[in-house]
Image (tube, rainbow, N blue to C red):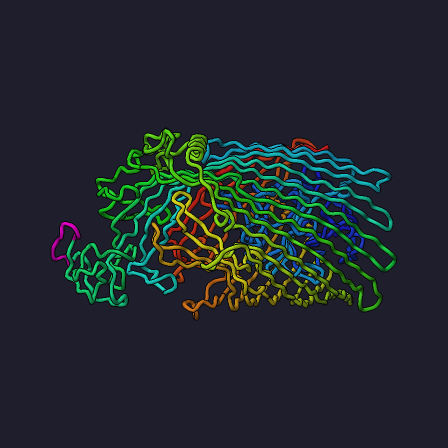
Amino acid sequence: MFNPPSRLKLAALTGTSVLALAFVPAVHAQTANTQAQKSAAKPATDEPITEVIVTGQRLSNANSILAQKKATGVVNVISADDLGKLPDANVADALARIPGVNVVVNQETGEGEYVSIRGLASTYNAYSINGVRVALTDASSRKMSMTVLPPNGLKAISVNKTLTPDLDGDAIGGSVNFVTPNAFDFRKPTLRVFASYGLNDRAQKQDEDAGSGQIQIDGARKFGDGRFGLFGSVYYGKSHYTNEETENDGEWEPYRWRKDSVEAIDSRSMYLPGIDLDFRRGEQERYGGNFSADYHSEQHDLYVRGQYAKLNRTGTNDYTDFRSRSTKRLTQVNLEDTTLLQPEQMITGRDPVKGNIYGYTTAQIVDADKDGLITDADRKSGNSYWSLFGRSGVWNPKAFQFARTHESQDQESSLYTINIGGQSRYERLTLDYDLSYSYGEKGTPLYYSIGYNCDKCSTDPMFTSTGILWSSADPRFPLAQLPAYAANVDRRDDLLPFDGASMSQDKQSDARTALKLDARYEMSGLIDYVKGGFKYLKSEREYDSTPIWEGDLSGTPLNGKSLGASGLVERQVDGFFKDRYYYGSILSREKVIAAVNAARAANPVTHSTAELSRDDKKGSETIYAGYALAHIQSGDLEVIAGARVEHTKVETTAWIDDGTKSGFGKTEKDYTNVLPSVTAVYRQGQNLIYRGAVWTSFSRPEYANISRGESVTRDKVTQEIIAINRGNPDLKPGESVNFDLSAEYYPDRSSVVSVGVFHKKIKNFIFTNGRSVNADTKEGTITITQPQNGEDATLTGVELNLIKSFEGLQAPFDGFGVEANVTSQNSSAETGLAYRRGHPISFLQAPDLIYNTSLTYQKYGIEAKLSYQYQGAYVEDTRDNAVDKWVQPNKSLDLHTRYTLRPGLTVDFDVQNILDGHRYYTTKGRSPTYQKDYMEPGRNFILRLAYTY
């Protein structure tokens, strides 16, 4: 066990452990100048000290725990060494190991992309690098896509779960700050080199590129009697991925006909229209770095800091589609009539032209051709899976489709920030100042798709006599039960005629400029100090979506040829999802691109201004904020009380089409939020701390969502409209009153036991609602989504956290330790939708249970951590008929090992996803019976080498 320290000497013997020395000062979320804070902040306790040397995992824990211990609010910290302890691809996966944080996975790559904090989705949180609010490049929300940021070159990540007035107030869930190092974080000139090589076993099994590699170089040095310091870090990496997914695009439908998307349906008995089998593969290239130039003197600390990250993804998705098709049906005169017999029971004869003659009367069934008889010719409206269009209709598909589509999934993302500022001290007055700029881009440089679809064979009885039946011993893997004459359709590329091709591109960007000034004045007496500040931030966003071409293969050698004769097939994939499916043909990316380019040259397309502009939007958001607080110190009690005011002004320009005229239109909106808060900390002795806070926060609407604009999504092959996304000029900011209470016990420097409870009362929360409307399309519907304000929501939870090393026990137990955290929460949200009233939902992206547990070992130069992560089920978004899309529980077992070859030289071996489980599993409704998406990315094996000089 640790002796009561009087002087803490931390000596890192491993590569990244040297960097962990930087984290002994308290880290405060959303501040760039941690060195300045160290100078200005008072120590939390006057602890007696003795010299003790801590290394490796225990050093990492000690630094993170000390930061948490000294903080005023509820803060969780991941130190630099923690970021190398598990095989996380990016910072989202790393953050998921913090109590109360869960990750939302990118379906294309299997990596974490977004995080939620305490059940609040990514859009409800604030994100900074060195205190600079980063540019956001999601087209329709305030979520930060973290795929561009690897866990490299960072000093730490801190998550603030409670806010004081000096922090940005637009974070109902919390704020995340990524901190990069500077030269003053190192005791001596330092050079570090990291290299890694990895392998994905799913890619290897499918004979795809499976390797990954990365190199990183860091350097730090102080000059001029230690007053000047330079730090720099650069990295380059390339990785490959392959994942397999079953995906249900067609939703699940009730046995009885449903009138529209808003009426409640019986979710206990639903039928599957169809699934896609997705085979994704790709390559990701990441590179970037960061730097810091600092000057420290007795009175002034100055800095210039910058960061750059770039992600290039080159990927493809081949998806095979088995699907029952909706077809034209006889329409009931009275749609509510449930007494009619089924059409098969009503056949009385057959007309050679009009088909079957039915015994219905014209008072029962709409006589579309006005001939006084009800025949197949009257099936003029109501595309449907059901036998009749009306309440008497039951599930009875009459046609099915088999299709193959190949699409590119390329992405280019970049993010950079730069800030200049410092701290100046004038006796009792301390000034902190910072000027920053952040810019980010994300987009698809060129998108290509081509499809082959038996839907064109509308006269072939193979595809028009019956729908598809489904069976499965496992709901994750529905199996198509095709008619005998079509049993081998997935092996018959000659049955698939060309169905369409397209080419497009899109890009979104955000440019943010910010200036902030904080002043702190030391007092005497009960008020320890007072603090006030001002912040200005302007964000300018643009989104551009450009259709380039869509059409057929006329004038090219592929015109009129089936997929089997096209020459586009690269190879056959037999085993899919561990041989549960036969997959079949995948197409060559290079040949598809060449075919689309040739077709475009032979059949040029000219787009109108409306077509080129309808999805484009741009806007600006200007924020003025000010705050004042007082810090009260009375013995062991510390209180921070004050208020923050934020005024927001928004201007948005988007394409508007009201049916009579179209063109770009501007929307303007402004609002003000007043945010009082009180935070208290009571330190009982050296080891026991109680915290409490009552604070207010809010969430701004995404400013593209408060426009009057409308975005249209088209089928990438057929170009039919399949979805419409509308803005809502009447959106209000979400607002929350938050309550936090916690107790923390620190038995020694590398151990902590804590329990916390939290409660959030939210009004006007923002969610996006989707509904299907009938339309004359291949699917028979168009999905319309629109952001809107809910009414009220509450979220209550308990967080437990334990970190304990068994140092001091008898061998062999003295090398072991345990880490565990559990978050249990309950939420309820009233959407305000009429058909849901009285039936609240769980708050979006709020799992009921999250936990992480790890067994650690450190002895004889060996470090190891075996970690198990569990994330409970949650609602991803609201869906039709009050049957929402749920994400099912996610589990992951990961291993990290490290061996110190000699001081400064270490080798790591890591395994991610040891159990080879899923990363993304969603269903329609909470029950796992109704599969929606199920994706497995395989295991990753990583070997790392770190050298520090």
Task: From the viewer's side, name the closer residue of 681 and 308.
Answer: 308
Horizontal and vertical percent position of residue 710: 49, 56
Residue 588 shows in the view:
yes
Number of on-image labels? 0
Horizontal and vertical percent position of residue 140: 54, 53
Question: What residue lies at 39% left-to-right and 34% top-to-bottom?
Answer: 586
Furthest-left residue in view? 349
Question: What residue lies at 20% left-to-right and 54% top-to-bottom?
Answer: 376
Residue 791 higher or lower than 463, as above or below: below
- Whether the magenta-drawn stretch holds residue 531 is answered as no
Q: Is residue 504 left or right of residue 62?
A: left
Task: From the viewer's side, name the closer residue of 677 and 657.
Answer: 657
Question: What residue lies at 58% left-to-right and 38% top-to-bottom?
Answer: 897
Residue 821 shows in the view:
no
Horizontal and vertical percent position of residue 516: 74, 56
Horizontal and vertical percent position of residue 843: 50, 62
Magenta highlight range: 345-355
Furthest-bottom residue in view? 838
Instruction: Quadrant for residue 682, please give it.
Output: bottom right
Instruction: Quadrant for residue 672, please give it.
Output: bottom right
- Whether the magenta-drawn stretch holds residue 349 is answered as yes
Task: From the viewer's side, name the closer residue of 492 and 450.
Answer: 450
Task: From the viewer's side, name the closer residue of 20 and 448.
Answer: 448
Q: Is residue 917 left or right of residue 50?
A: left
Residue 684 higher or lower than 12, as above or below: below
> Which quadrant would the C terminus be assigned to in this image?
top right
